[in-house]
Image (cartoon, rainbow, N blue to C red):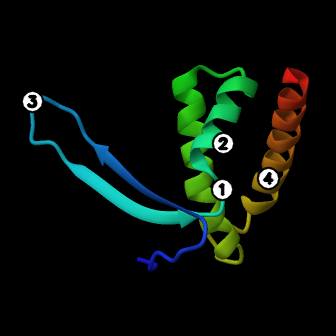
Amino acid sequence: MNPITKKGHHYRITVEEFDSQKESKTLQIEFQDREDLFHLVEVLKKGSELPADEATRLGLALRLLGPVMMQKRKHPLFLDFMPHFKVFMQNLKSKMKASVQGDH
């Protein structure tokens, strides 16, 4: 795992499997990000027209996947997907920007 530095925002995400019929499992990761994840999720909740829980999941997914893909963009796992992800992100950003500007 990368050491946490003083730059950006620091996060810890815990995922717990909830099944009363078996022992629960937990995953936990710590990471830093240049983006304010809470702000991003709020913007997505307001501007994406997705239900709040889906907007939250989308925000988390994008900030977990995006930086890894950018850092490893030449990795064979990401080569085919990267151009599509870039177009998706540009489209998402323009829609969210238009939505936020429409609120003012």
| Element at label 1 | loop
Name the foreground residue: 75 vs 47. 47
Q: Are marks 1 and 3 in contact (CB under 8 Å)?
A: no
Q: Which mark is residue 40?
A: 2
* Residue at image point 79% right, 53% down: 84
Per the rendering, the mark at residue 84 is 4
Residue 48, by quadrant, is: top right
Q: Secondary structure at mark 3?
A: loop
Amino acid type at mark 1: Glu
Identity, as a three-letter code, of the amino acid under mark 4: His
Answer left or right for 22 relative to 101. left
**3D distance between C-alphas at marks 2 and 1:** 8 Å
- Disc with the residue nearer the chain's start (4 vs 3): 3
Q: Amino acid at mark 3?
A: Gln
Q: Residue 71 appears at what percent x and percent y?
A: 66, 74
Crowd tier of the residue under label 1, counting other residues whose Cα lies within 10 Å: few below 14, some 14–19, many 20 or above? few
The residue that appears at 61% across and 37% down in the rendered structure is: 41
At x 29%, y 54%, the residue is: 27
Q: Is residue 89 above or below residue 41?
A: below
Picture quarter with the N terminus: bottom left
Q: Is residue 75 left or right of residue 5?
A: right
Label 2 SS: helix
For marks 1 and 3, the one nearer the N-term is 3
For the residues marked 4 and 1, what is the alpha-carbon distance in whole angstroms? 21 Å
Q: Which residue is mark 1?
A: 35
| C-alpha separation, residue under disc 1 versus residue under disc 3 | 38 Å
Please identify, in this view, whether the residue under mark 1 or under mark 3 is nearer the observer: 1
Q: In front of the other: label 2 or label 3?
A: 2
Label of residue 21 in the image: 3
Location of residue 28 in the rendering, given as x and y in whole percent from the top left corner: 32, 57
Q: Are marks 4 and 3 in contact (CB under 8 Å)?
A: no
